[in-house]
């Protein structure tokens, strides 16, 4: 029985090897040329797989980009949550900014790729596996923001969830709008910080409208 299982193990290892080569090739090419300057055939060639094999792992170039960006997005969220965990508990604003700082840097590392990634998550088929994974990561970011907002005793869980959705919308526009493309990460983050500060100030003064 042990020998019967070995071929399955080899096949799985071969599949994993191909997936890793495809991911590495896509990551390198997207970084070098941007998603608009890369074809699936180029990715297949660099990964040394047939184009038909590539399509078994990602049916479109958009899915390839989402595969690559999901890894970066997850790492950015992890880094942000770690940074936020050591900020003063009395400052929900500082916690939120610490969380989103690496996320903003991730999205803007290559502006074209980041903008396309977020566009695909928002407007693409949410049932597609890689998009579903990306949307789950977006939900994790939103939940992390909400938890940080509840550090403030004036913000309950329900309001925190609503505010977190508003803040993620601010992040989306601030990191993808064409008018902000040529701004530095620090400038974009500073603008986001000011918007969040105003929103929280309004919340503190009168709470969210019923």
Image: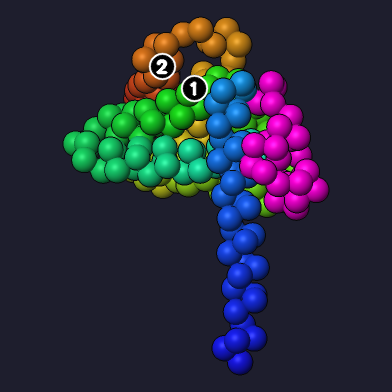
Considering only vertical position in the picture, is 160 above or below 203? Answer: below
Q: Nearer the viewer, residue 93 or 186?
A: 186
- Residues in magenta, as a range: 35-62
Residue located 42% across and 11% down the image: 184
Considering only vertical position in the picture, is 124 above or below 183? Answer: below
Residue located 80% across and 48% down the image: 52
Considering only vertical position in the picture, is 207 above or below 180? Answer: below
Percent across and percent down for residue 141 are 46, 41
**Residue 104 appears in the figure:** no
| Magenta segment, prevailing SS (helix, strand or loop) | helix
Which numbered disc, 2 or 1, marks the residue that appears first in the sequence? Answer: 1
Percent across and percent down for residue 151 are 28, 42
Residue located 21% across and 40% down the image: 86
User: Where is mark 2, residue-wise?
Assistant: 185
Residue 195, located in which quarter of the rendered image?
top left
Percent across and percent down for residue 110 are 53, 22
Query: How many numbered marks are there?
Result: 2
Q: Which mark is residue 108?
A: 1
Residue 78, located in which quarter of the rendered image?
top left
Q: Nearer the viewer, residue 32 or 180?
A: 32
Q: Secondary structure at mark 2?
A: helix
Give the Cα distance between marks 2 and 1: 7 Å
| Render colour scheme | rainbow
**Residue 193 appears in the figure:** yes
Q: Are marks 2 and 1 in contact (CB under 8 Å)?
A: yes
Q: Nearer the viewer, residue 77 or 156?
A: 77
């Amino acid at each position: 029985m042990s020998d019967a299982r070995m071929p399955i193990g080899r096949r799985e290892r071969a599949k994993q090897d191909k997936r890793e080569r495809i991911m590495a090739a896509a990551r390198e090419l997207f970084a070098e040329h941007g998603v608009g300057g890369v074809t699936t055939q180029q990715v297949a060639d660099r990964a040394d797989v047939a184009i038909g094999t590539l399509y078994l792992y990602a049916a479109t170039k958009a899915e390839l980009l989402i595969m690559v960006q999901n890894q970066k997005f997850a790492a950015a969220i992890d880094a942000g949550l770690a940074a936020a965990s050591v900020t003063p508990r009395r400052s929900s604003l500082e916690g939120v900014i610490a969380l989103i700082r690496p996320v903003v840097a991730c999205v803007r590392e290559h502006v074209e790729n980041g903008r396309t990634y977020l566009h695909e998550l928002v407007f693409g088929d949410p049932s597609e596996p890689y998009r579903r994974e990306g949307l789950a990561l977006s939900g994790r970011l939103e939940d992390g923001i909400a938890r940080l907002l509840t550090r403030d005793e004036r913000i309950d869980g329900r309001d925190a969830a609503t505010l977190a959705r508003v803040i993620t919308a601010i992040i989306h526009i601030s990191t993808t709008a064409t008018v902000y493309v040529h701004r530095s990460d620090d400038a974009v983050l500073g603008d986001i910080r000011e918007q969040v500060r105003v929103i929280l100030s309004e919340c503190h003064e009168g709470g969210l409208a019923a």
